[in-house]
């Protein structure tokens, strides 16, 4: 694929069979949870209630990777948040400025909550899309209660559908997580990625079904195989030096992302309102879609993909609206579009956006058929540009060095965990956790366009620290006492063994 085409369209999507195997069941269940209540509302002569119920039905896109025991409360919570978004955005819909502020707060809070609770995608995007679409239904105070009740009914239906596999396959999510961990161990992924897959599998088994034999022995086998198979790197005996920096309090990686998301979503909506655009929520939705990442490079790439996908999606929506389809056919089309989104969102973002755009337009058009399709399409293009511009401003300018400023603390934490293991005051699990955290911060730091001074040296030292840490874990697992002692001596020569292991913040 030519480089320019790759930048515009992203990676080539997998084969349809692979997409269906990975997400087909989830896609169909989500489509049913949206299309069935939408069709029921249309058939009953209350298309607006059908659209509101369909928005609640989008609860079905959350939680599929979680064990059923954890999925039940998490999906219920996601449904409650979506219903809340329908309520507050319905109330705020009459004021574009107030709506922009509300969507920004929802986006920031949802970004933080989904990261802390490890809910997974689509994160804040679903909340903003549902809230914004609910505001477009134009709920008068007399109709708002009906919309909220319909959304709650759709969310309840989605919860039942998402939980239905528990009846026939209680341990399905745990088994799939363990299988994914096994594939990671057998593959050639970096040790940090394999460790994350094993951590996900361990968490899934710990929170999994009690109606089936435990998969924990298999997880332990995979952990042992992973550590036993690690090839100790050729670690230089002397660690690379890094500049002294002022102490920076370590904060979770999601904090700057949540701040950027809040600012970008709020700013996009306010700018769209200031320009007098009709559907300011779409600018906010575009902004949150662009900012779903950890740094400036991710935001820039998603901005390009968002433009390409939106243009494709507007073309698809134009064809659908120009065809003047019967409303029953439009309901079916909504379901098919959601199937496309769910199949593609993790594999090919451009094509997923090309489905999301007409999906949103069709949901609003079915619920409010008196709104012109040409009007809907025309405003989408301008609002998309506004959303991308504000998202890029937030992603590039707001907290541009958040990761590189956290890097020294992450390196120090990993060094202290290594020291604790060498001196017998720590355990292997703590070191693995510290190395995973170091990799997360290092990845974000490498993605920043304007890193803090001295970042290159700290990244070099981070690689040395990771090599020593993973090598030490591998040597201990294989019983290679001489190698373990040598790696311990290298850590001791660096002075990390004598460093206080007090849980403080390093610099």
Image: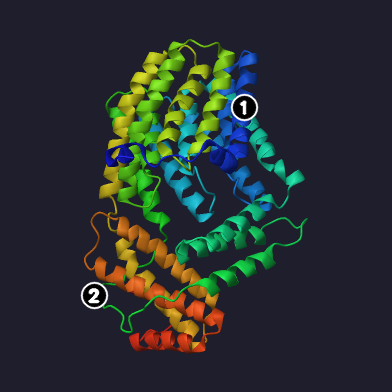
Foreground mark, 2 or 1, reads: 2
Q: Is residue 92 visible?
A: no
Horizontal relation, residue 385 to residue 476: left or right: left
Task: Residue at the far front: name it.
Answer: 1
Q: Position of residue 104 (x, y in %)?
A: 40, 40
Q: Position of residue 433 (x, y in %)?
A: 49, 69
Tag 1 or tag 2, which sits nearer the N-term? 1
Residue position for label 2:
243
From the viewer's perspective, is residue 360 above or below residue 496?
above
- Residue 163 — which label? none
Of 193 and 231, nearer the camera is: 231
Q: In this view, does 378 lie to the left or right of 218?
A: left
Q: In which quarter of the image is the N terminus?
A: top left
Q: Which residue lies furthest to the right in this view?
A: 211
- Name the residue that disc number 1 marks: 150
At 66% from the left and 55% from the top, the residue drawn is 175
Crowding at label 1, few (<14), some or many (≥20) Cα neighbours within 10 Å? many
Question: Spatial distance from mark 2 to mark 1, Cα to Cα?
Answer: 59 Å
Residue 254: percent from the left, percent from the top?
A: 42, 55
Question: Please, what secondary structure does the residue beneath circle 2 have?
Answer: loop
Q: In this view, does 58 lie above or below 237?
A: above
Instruction: Please state which of residues 461 and 454 is positioned toward the viewer in this rendering.
Output: 461
Q: Quadrant of the rendered structure where residue 53 is?
A: top right
Tell me whether the residue at label 2 lies in contact with that at label 1, contact meaning CB atoms closer than 8 angstroms.
no
Q: Is residue 232 above or below residue 76?
A: below
Q: Is residue 299 visible?
A: yes
Point 55% across, 84% down: residue: 479
Q: Quadrant of the C terminus?
A: bottom left
């Amino acid at each position: 694929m030519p480089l320019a085409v790759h930048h515009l369209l992203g990676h080539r999507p997998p084969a349809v069979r692979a997409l269906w195997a990975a997400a087909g069941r989830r896609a169909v269940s989500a489509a049913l949870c949206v299309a069935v209540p939408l069709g029921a509302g249309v058939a009953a002569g209350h298309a607006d209630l059908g659209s509101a119920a369909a928005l609640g039905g989008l609860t079905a896109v959350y939680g599929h990777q979680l064990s059923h025991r954890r999925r039940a409360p998490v999906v219920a919570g996601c449904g409650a948040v979506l219903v809340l978004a329908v309520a507050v955005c319905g109330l705020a819909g009459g004021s574009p400025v107030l709506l922009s502020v509300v969507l920004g707060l929802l986006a920031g809070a949802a970004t933080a909550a989904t990261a802390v609770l490890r809910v997974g995608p689509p994160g804040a995007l679903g909340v903003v899309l549902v809230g914004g679409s609910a505001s477009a239904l134009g709920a008068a105070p007399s109709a708002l209660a009906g919309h909220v009740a319909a959304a709650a009914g759709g969310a309840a239906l989605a919860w039942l559908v998402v939980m239905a596999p528990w009846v026939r396959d209680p341990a399905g999510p745990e088994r799939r997580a363990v299988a994914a961990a096994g594939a990671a161990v057998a593959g050639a992924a970096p040790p940090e990625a394999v460790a994350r897959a094993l951590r996900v599998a361990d968490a899934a088994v710990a929170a999994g079904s009690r109606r089936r034999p435990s998969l924990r022995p298999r997880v332990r086998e995979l952990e042992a195989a992973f550590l036993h198979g690690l090839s100790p790197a050729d670690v230089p005996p002397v660690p690379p030096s890094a500049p002294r920096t002022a102490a920076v309090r370590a904060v979770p990686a999601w904090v700057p992302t949540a701040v950027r998301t809040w600012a970008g979503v709020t700013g996009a909506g306010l700018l769209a309102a200031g320009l007098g655009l009709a559907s300011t929520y779409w600018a906010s939705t575009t902004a949150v879609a662009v900012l779903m990442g950890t740094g400036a490079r991710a935001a820039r790439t998603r901005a390009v993909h968002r433009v390409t996908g939106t243009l494709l999606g507007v073309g698809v929506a134009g064809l659908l609206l120009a065809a003047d389809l019967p409303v029953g056919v439009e309901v079916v089309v909504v379901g098919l579009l959601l199937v496309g989104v769910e199949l593609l969102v993790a594999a090919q973002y451009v094509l997923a956006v090309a489905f999301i755009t007409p999906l949103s337009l069709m949901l609003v058009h079915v619920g409010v058929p008196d709104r012109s399709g040409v009007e809907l399409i025309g405003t989408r293009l301008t609002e998309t540009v506004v959303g991308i511009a504000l998202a890029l401003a937030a992603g590039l300018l707001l907290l541009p060095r958040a990761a590189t400023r956290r890097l020294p603390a992450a390196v120090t934490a990993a060094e202290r965990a290594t020291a604790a293991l060498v001196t017998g005051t720590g355990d292997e699990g703590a070191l693995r956790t510290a190395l995973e955290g170091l990799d997360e911060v290092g990845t974000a730091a490498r993605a920043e366009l304007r890193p803090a001074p001295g970042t290159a040296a700290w990244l070099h030292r981070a690689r040395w620290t990771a090599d020593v840490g993973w090598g030490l874990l591998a040597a201990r697992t294989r019983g290679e006492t001489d190698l373990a002692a040598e790696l311990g001596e290298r850590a001791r020569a660096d002075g990390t063994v004598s460093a206080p292991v007090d849980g403080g913040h390093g610099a």
